[in-house]
Image (tube, rainbow, N blue to C red):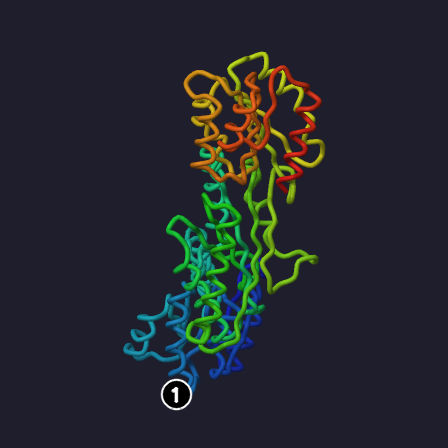
Amino acid sequence: MSKNQTKLFVINEDLEFHSFLTKHVNAFTLYFYNNQDDLLKQLYLERPDCLVLNIDQLSVESETSLQDVFVWSQSNFTPTITVMNRFEQKDRTKYLSCSDSVFNHPLKVDELLASIHMHTQKRAQFLAHSLVDSLTTAYNSHYLRDELQRQLNDMKRSHEPLTLVYLETEVNNVNTLREIQVVKSFVTCIKNSIRPTDFLGQYGPSNGFALLLPKTVKEDARKLLNRLTKIVLEKGDILFEKSSFSFSAKIVEVTEHNVSPEECLSALPFTNKEEGGQIVEGSLSEDGIGLKRLNIAIIDDDRLIRELLKHQLEDIAEDEYKLEIKTFAEGEEFFSDPWHRQNERFILIIDRIMPKMDGLEILRKIRAEYDRKRYLCFMLTSRGSEADVALAIQKGANDYMTKPFSLKELEVRIKRLLRGSR
């Protein structure tokens, strides 16, 4: 292990032992500490990989405070090596019960180094398979990436929406017991406000978190944040022990399953243009943040019409949208395709008369069972009486054209619908 990888936290009041470690244990980053009053704070701040406790020459008060250190090391899965210069069996047994290794002076350097290596390697292997961040009690960043990949794979299969939320507390450096407790209380508050299928992981600094919301649109994510804000305002004194507390959030809607977990996570932290203390919204697609998708479904039982329209509309998005066009021979085929369940904008070009499910039935189903803001419905049919047009508009059509039709006029009308729906 390199010097930057492994941190040893040494609790010691013996100058001779200090010199011994400095000389022989120089392959690690050493933190010497002899002030027992602020010990736990420093442990939380440094988060060492291993503790070395020199019991010899410690005062009675220091030995008493070490009990808290042993509790901390066990709860944070940090190995503890105790060094002592006492040969009474009862003292050795006492420290064996709460230490991973116990050595007596004079020390053998090779044995001490071997013990440090063994315990720190075991800890690294354990943390690699651990799911929870010991400091914040949220899931750790390694598990966060694995879960995000799983969610993206599920999104590819189901076409259900996925929204990410980045949460950052006002606590910039979690290095006091009070700040640690405040962050833990915030994590608990979030866990109590989300669904079992949602996922909260630690990301970025110790005061940053990523919330994965599967099958959730951006609007519902904002509602969740509004509820969290209300809880913080109404119950903050109780939850955060009367500490001043606030948080900022960024909502990122994932609209393309082919992006990687790293691309998703890199879009979360605030940029220089985005300030804290607010809720920021964005989107993430295969081509980057902010590029919107446009899906066009052509539903017509005439194959020639389907192919003609698909070819004509391929350039309608220009540089403003990422376009996908799919064709369907009738309504049931469209509704059975999970493609239309994506949390994106759709334009449906619908023929009026088709077998199994006609155009009016498609309109009725879309308006009754789906989010009407995501679907613009364009009726294209040979029936052009005033009564037919009025009925289609009444059922939910946004526009209506009769066959035969002008391709140029159709394109102009669709672009007008897009502008009007922004």
* Mark 1 neighbour density, 10 Å: few (under 14) some (14–19) many (20 or more): few
Query: Residue, x 68% and y 19% (percent of image)?
Result: 406
In this rendering, position of residue 400 left or right of residue 91: right
Q: Nearer the viewer, residue 274 or 58?
A: 274
Query: Residue, x 48% and y 37% (percent of image)?
Result: 155
Q: Position of residue 24 (x, y in %)?
A: 55, 68
Q: Secondary structure at mark 1?
A: helix
Work out which residue is located at the far front of the displayed protein and give it: 386
Q: Nearer the viewer, residue 291 or 393?
A: 393
Vertical side of 302 occupied by 42: above or below = below
In this rendering, position of residue 202 left or right of residue 276: left
- Quarter occupied by the N terminus: bottom right
Q: Position of residue 239 (x, y in %)?
A: 43, 72
In this rendering, position of residue 305 left or right of residue 122: right
- Quarter occupied by the C terminus: top right
Q: Nearer the viewer, residue 399 or 70?
A: 399
Residue marked by disc 1: 60
Q: Position of residue 46 (x, y in %)?
A: 53, 69
Work out which residue is located at the far bottom of the displayed protein and give it: 60
The amino acid pointed to by label 1 is: Val
Query: Residue, x 53% and y 53% (percent of image)?
Result: 165
Q: Quadrant of residue 386?
A: top right
Query: Residue, x 50% and y 64% (percent of image)?
Result: 229
Q: Nearer the viewer, residue 333 or 71?
A: 333
